[in-house]
Amino acid sequence: MTRSALMVSCWVAASLLTQPAKAQPVGAPVDATKEAAADLYEQARQAYDAGELENARAKIEASIAAMPSPNSELLLGHILRALGHKVDAILAYERAAAGAKARVVQGQSRFEPTVAEASKWSGLLGASLAALEIELVGDGPQATVRVGQTSYVLRPAPQGPASMSLWLEPGDVAIEVVRGEQRTTRSLSLAAGSSQQLSFELAAPRALGIADRSYAPPIGTWVSFGVGALGLGTFAALGAWTLSVDAGLEACSPTCPPDRREEADLGESLQIGANVGAAIGGAALLVGVILWIVDASTEPEDPLAPKARAGGLELRF
C-alpha cells in the first residue's frame, strides 16, 4: 500500500470511529462511507479557510478517495491553486466541471453553481498556462511520451490518430517519444495562453513477405562461379592440349624414339593440370550453389526494424 493510500484509509477510519452513534431504523442503514467523505470535506474546507493548505489538501484528497464528488474536486482545485500548483489545479477544475455538468443533465440543478465556478477558474488558469496536444499519426505499437520529467503511455486509437492534451507551465520544455529502441526529442518554447500541436508520424513495422525476398545470387556465389568457370576453362584448354600431344605420340606407339620422351612427359603434366582445373572448377561451382541456397533460405532484414542508433522517429509540425 502506498503512503497516500495508507493516509486516506487512516483518515476514513478515524472519521468513521469519531462519528456519534445514531439510532438506525430497521431497513435504513447509515451510509458510513458517504458520511465519512462529507466529514472529511468539511474538515478540508475549514482547513482551507484557516490557511492550512497542506492539511486541507490531505483531507480533501481523502474525501475524494472515499467518495468522488464534483464539489470536492472544486475545493481541491481551489487548494491546489492556492498552493501554486496551477497545472494540477486546472485539471481538478476540469474534472469538477465535467462531473457537475453530468449531474445537471441528470436533473440535479444544485450543481449548476459548481459548473460556473469550475469553468471560470479553468478559463483564468488557462490564460496563464500553455496547452499542448501531442498526436501520433500512423499505425504502430504504443509509445512512451516524456514531457519534461513526466512520462505518459500513448496507445494507438481504434480510428484516427492517437492524441493527448496537456496543460504545461510556460517556458522551454523537452518532448521525447520512445517506441522500442527508436526515440526522438524535440524542444519547444511555450508561451502563456498559447496552444500548440505536435505531431509524430511513427512507421509501423511490417511483416516481410515473398515479394520482399530477393533470390538473386549473392556476391559469394558470383565469385565462386567465376573461380569455377576459370577452373573448367583450364581443364578444357589443358585437356585439348593433352589430346593433341597424345595424338602425336599415338602414331609411333609403342616404339617411339627416345627423343620424343620429353613430349610424353609434357602430355602427362598437361593431363595433371587439366584434372586439377576440373577439380577446382567443380568444387567452386558446388560452393557457389550452396551459398546461393543458404542466402535464399535466410530471412531478409526488415529495413523498418528498430536498430540501436541515434535518431529514429520522424517529427512533423
Image: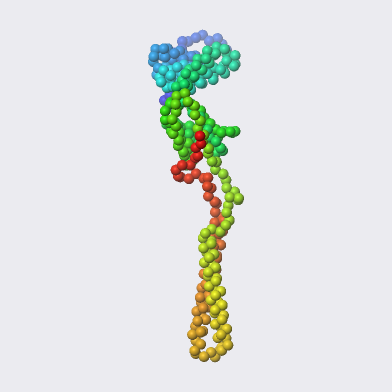
Q: In the rendered image, which quarter is residue 102 located in?
A: top right
What residue appears at the point 54 percent right and 51 percent down from the top-left corner?
A: 300
- Dividing the picture into quadrants, the one containing residue 139 is top right
Q: How is the image coloured?
A: rainbow
Viewer can see residue 62? no
Residue visible at 49% across and 85% down?
262
Against 239, residue 155 (above or below) is above
Quadrant including the N terminus: top left
Expressed as whole percent of the image width and height from the top left, the position of residue 154 reads: 51, 33
Q: Is residue 242 above or below residue 212?
A: below
Of residues 87 and 38, the one nearer the viewer is 87
Q: What residue appears at the point 51 percent right and 8 percent down from the top-left corner?
A: 23
In the visual, does 48 lie left or right of 156? left
Total numbered circles? 0
- The residue lying toward the viewer, choosing from 4 and 102, is 102
Residue 234 picture location, percent across and down: 53, 73
In front here: 285 or 133? Answer: 133
User: Does the rendering let one see residue 311?
Assistant: yes
Q: Report x, y in % for residue 113.
A: 52, 12
Residue at 53% from the left image edge and 16% from the top image edge: 115
Q: Position of residue 303 (x, y in %)?
A: 52, 47
